[in-house]
């Protein structure tokens, strides 16, 4: 249960950082940004773990060890936000 809450917080932060890096009128507000951030954080976290061996974040105890995973989560959120914009723009 704690890991789920941490992933939600991480996704929320990753989504807002991704939105700050790549601003634009996406609609949906806080809820959509959080959902895209959570999806991006999960995807980025798993890919960072699979390809580079970054540890999966399960607590906020040691921020230094979690920083590479958090950065890969932000990159994942950026990719998911870009894909959302590309798919949403074609409608």
Image (tube, grey):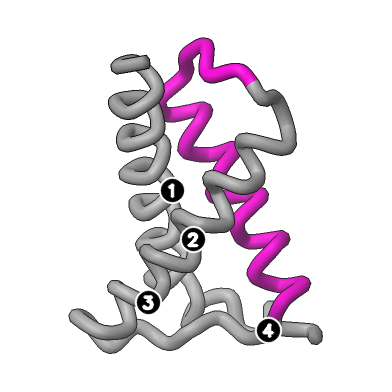
Image spot of residue 39 (x, y percent): 50, 57
Image quarter where the C terminus lies is: top left
Q: CA distance from mark 3 to mark 4?
A: 16 Å
Categorize mark 2 by other alpha carbons within 10 Å: few (<14), some (14-19), many (20+): many
The span picked out in magenta is: 4-27
**Magenta residue check for 89:** no
Indicate the position of residue 3 as horizontal and vertical percent values.
70, 83
Question: As rendered, which of 36 and 62 lies closer to the eye?
Answer: 36
The residue pinned by badge 3 equals 46
Classify mark 3: residues with Cα within 10 Å, few (<14), some (14-19) or many (20+).
Answer: many
Q: Mark 2 and 1 residues: CB-CB less than 8 Å, in contact?
A: yes
How far apart are labels 3 and 2 at the CA level? 8 Å
Q: Quadrant of residue 27?
A: top right
**Which residue is tagged 1?**
77
User: Which residue occupies 65% across, 44% down?
Assistant: 34
**35 on left or right of 86:** right
Looking at marks 3 and 4 on the same chain, the residue that comes earlier in the sequence is marked by 3
Q: Position of residue 87 (x, y in %)?
A: 33, 28
- Mark 4 to mark 1 CA distance (whole Å): 20 Å
In the picture, measured across the screen, residue 17 lies left or right of residue 33, that is left
């Amino acid at each position: 249960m704690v890991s789920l809450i941490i992933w939600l917080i991480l996704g929320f932060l990753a989504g807002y950082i991704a939105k700050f890096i790549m601003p634009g009128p996406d609609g949906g507000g806080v809820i959509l940004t959080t959902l895209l951030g959570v999806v991006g954080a999960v995807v980025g976290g798993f890919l960072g773990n699979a390809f580079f061996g970054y540890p999966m974040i399960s607590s906020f105890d040691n921020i230094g060890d979690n920083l590479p995973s958090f950065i890969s989560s932000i990159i994942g959120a950026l990719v998911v936000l870009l894909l959302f914009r590309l798919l949403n723009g074609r409608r």
